[in-house]
């Protein structure tokens, strides 16, 4: 009986050892399998992480090639690529903005510098009338730069909630004030047509700035003498239409669709 008990004990010990060995091997294999599974599952996330790390402002052309997946990883990849698209467009807009600023300010700065040099010569050897005339030209260019800076500041605030502040304004009073500002700009050949005596809800400064830009651009791109007309179109309540019209060649058809996009120019100019 004792021998049978010892033999059973040894058999149980051997069996337990085999079970423990098998369990250990199973745990190791399960760990390896889990590691491989996790590595395979995390590979797309590492791809996204690498793409995010490699994205630089001077090179945003790379995209994550995981959009074909139909799971959450694929949706994340699509959103990531859309984010890169928006970021790339934003950087390109910023570059165009800086190029536009450089172009717009270069001309008046160059002209003002040249006139200042002439002013220095005129102050020593020229007549008082030459000094006055040259100083007036410099002042004109400085005013132009001031207007450009104001335009750029307005562009930077265009996304603010309080950028547009409508208020009740008399249509006639608004256009009378606009006409005085046009006279102050020295713009010639502008005719204001009679308008209705109505109250309108507008942001006076923003609308005046927009219409002044249209008037200045009409004169700037005119070839020879051009008549610029400002007036009111036929109105349908609750709207009032205003126009700035000239008798020039008009806008090239190739740029009409994109004319109101930022930094688009209708043609080459010095302005």
Image (cartoon, grey):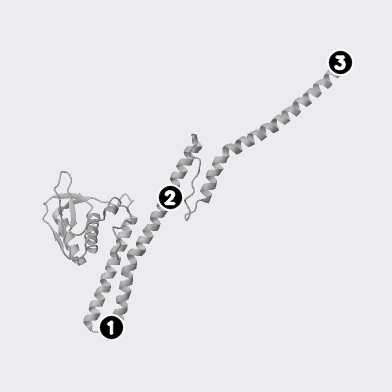
Q: Residue at x 23, y 78 (%)?
A: 132
**Residue 14 visible within the image:** yes
Q: Earlier in the sequence, mark 3 or mark 2?
A: 3
- For discs 1 and 3, the disc positioned in front in the rendered view: 1
Check the image and report above or below for 70 versus 96. above
- For discs 3 and 2, the disc positioned in front in the rendered view: 2
Q: Residues within 10 Å of mark 1 (few under 14, many from 20)?
A: some
**Residue marked by disc 3:** 4
**Residue 259 visible within the image:** no
Residue 160 drawn at (x, y percent) = 33, 51
Q: Residues within 10 Å of mark 3 (few under 14, many from 20)?
A: few
Q: Earlier in the sequence, mark 1 or mark 2?
A: 2
Q: Earlier in the sequence, mark 1 or mark 3?
A: 3
Residues at badges 1 and 3 in contact (C-beta under 8 Å)?
no
Q: Is residue 16 left or right of residue 78?
A: right
**Label 3: which secondary element:** helix
Q: Is residue 166 left or right of residue 75?
A: left
Residue 227 drawn at (x, y percent) = 16, 61
Q: Quadrant of residue 125?
A: bottom left
Q: Residues within 10 Å of mark 2 (few under 14, many from 20)?
A: some
**Residue marked by disc 1:** 123
**Label 2: which secondary element:** helix
Classify the position of the C terminus by image quarter: bottom left
**Residue marked by disc 2:** 87
Q: Nearer the viewer, residue 126 or 74?
A: 74
């Amino acid at each position: 009986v004792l021998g049978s008990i010892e033999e059973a004990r040894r058999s149980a010990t051997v069996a337990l050892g085999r079970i423990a060995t098998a369990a250990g091997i199973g745990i190791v294999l399960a760990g390896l399998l889990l590691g491989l599974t996790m590595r395979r599952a995390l590979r797309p996330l590492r791809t996204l992480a690498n793409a995010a790390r490699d994205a630089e402002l001077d090179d945003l052309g790379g995209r994550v090639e995981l959009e074909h997946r139909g799971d959450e990883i694929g949706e994340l990849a699509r959103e990531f690529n859309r984010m890169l698209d928006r970021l790339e467009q934003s950087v390109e807009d910023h570059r165009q903005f800086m190029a536009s600023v450089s172009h717009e300010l270069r001309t008046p700065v160059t002209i003002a510098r040249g006139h200042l040099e002439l002013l220095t010569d005129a102050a020593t050897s020229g007549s008082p009338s030459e000094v006055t005339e040259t100083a007036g030209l410099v002042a004109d260019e400085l005013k132009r730069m001031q207007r450009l800076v104001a335009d750029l500041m307005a562009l930077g605030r265009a996304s603010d909630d309080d950028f547009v502040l409508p208020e009740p304004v008399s249509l006639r009073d608004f256009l009378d004030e606009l006409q005085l500002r046009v006279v102050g700009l020295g713009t010639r050949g502008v005719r204001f047509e009679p308008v209705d005596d109505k109250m309108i809800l507008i942001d006076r400064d923003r609308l005046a700035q927009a219409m002044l830009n249209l008037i200045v651009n009409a004169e700037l791109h005119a070839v020879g003498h051009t008549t610029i007309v400002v007036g009111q179109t036929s109105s349908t309540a609750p709207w009032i239409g205003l126009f700035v019209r000239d008798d020039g060649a008009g806008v090239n058809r190739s740029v009409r669709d994109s004319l109101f996009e930022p930094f688009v120019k209708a043609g080459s100019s010095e302005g």
